């Protein structure tokens, strides 16, 4: 039997991009921190913030994840684990550094066992500053990363809708 050629490669690529934007699976990795950022990431999954309404699902395996959420400064001990997890993720893969420690080493900068921020070890696509960052900021960082992937032409504007939802959430929270 002759293998068939893909007659619509641009449609297939557009479908993959659409699926990646509308249903990303994320993996959380703590490379050595105080766990403040970890608690805020878990808070985004609670019904109050409901990260899953954007189609984002927390995944336990790097082989199934599209986005790697990293917290904490990279320690010498965690460096090899972070590299292994990053290499196990399929392409295209995206990394979000969450918190001051993940960006620059934070309060642990200068310690004998700290190498620095996440970008010292793997490339980072989005940064969410704060110590710890609020759940709204984490959601906004992930949504901005997804919106930067550029939805295919004729998309339904999900990323723009998600940004509006985050803004409404922040306003609601400030008025409480």
Image (cartoon, rainbow, N blue to C red):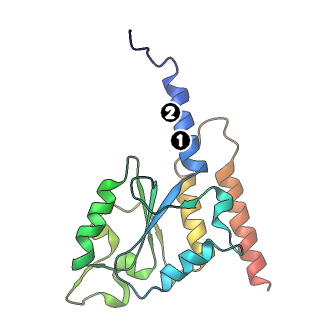
- Kindly indicate the quadrant of the structure image that contains residue 144: bottom right
Q: Is residue 91 left or right of residue 132?
A: left
Say whether residue 108 is left or right of residue 77: right
Residue count near mark 2 (Cα–Cα under 10 Å), binned few <14, some 14–19, many ≥20: few
| CA distance for labels 1 and 2 | 6 Å
Say above or below: 50 vs 19: below
- Occupied quadrant, residue 74: bottom left
Residue 72 can be seen, yes or no: yes
Q: Position of residue 35 (x, y in %)?
A: 45, 85
Q: Measuring 39% from the left and 53% from the top, which residue is drawn there?
A: 63
How many numbered marks have been drawn onto this rendered protein structure?
Answer: 2
The residue shown at (47%, 19%) is 6
Label of residue 65 in the image: none
Q: Which residue is mark 1?
A: 17
**Considering the numbered disc 2 on the image, is that residue within a helix, a strand or a loop?**
helix
- Specify whether 155 is left or right of 93: right
Q: Residue at x 62, y 71 (%)?
A: 45
Q: Quadrant of residue 139?
A: bottom right
Picture layout, residue 6 above or below residue 61: above
Q: Residue at x 73, y 72 (%)?
A: 169
Residue located beneath label 2 in the image:
13
Residue sitting farthest toward the top: 1
Residue 1 location in percent, x, y? 38, 9
Question: Circles 1 and 2: CB distance less than 8 Å?
Answer: yes
In the rendered image, the residue lying farthest to the front is 1
Secondary structure of residue under mark 1: helix
């Amino acid at each position: 039997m002759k293998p068939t050629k893909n007659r619509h490669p641009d449609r297939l690529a557009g479908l993959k991009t659409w699926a990646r934007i509308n249903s990303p699976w994320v993996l959380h990795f703590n490379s050595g921190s105080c766990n403040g950022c970890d608690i805020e990431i878990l808070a985004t999954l609670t019904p109050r913030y409901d990260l899953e309404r954007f189609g984002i699902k927390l995944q336990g395996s790097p082989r199934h994840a599209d986005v790697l959420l990293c917290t904490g400064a990279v320690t010498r001990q965690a460096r090899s684990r972070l590299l292994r997890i990053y290499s196990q993720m399929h392409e295209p893969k995206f990394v979000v550094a969450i918190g001051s420690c993940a960006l620059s080493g934070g309060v642990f900068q200068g310690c004998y066992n700290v190498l620095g921020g996440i970008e010292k070890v793997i490339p980072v696509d989005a940064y969410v500053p704060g110590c710890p960052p609020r759940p709204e900021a984490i959601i906004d960082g992930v949504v901005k990363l997804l919106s930067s992937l550029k939805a295919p032409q004729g998309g339904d504007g999900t990323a723009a809708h998600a940004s509006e939802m985050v803004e409404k959430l922040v306003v609601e929270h400030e008025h409480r």
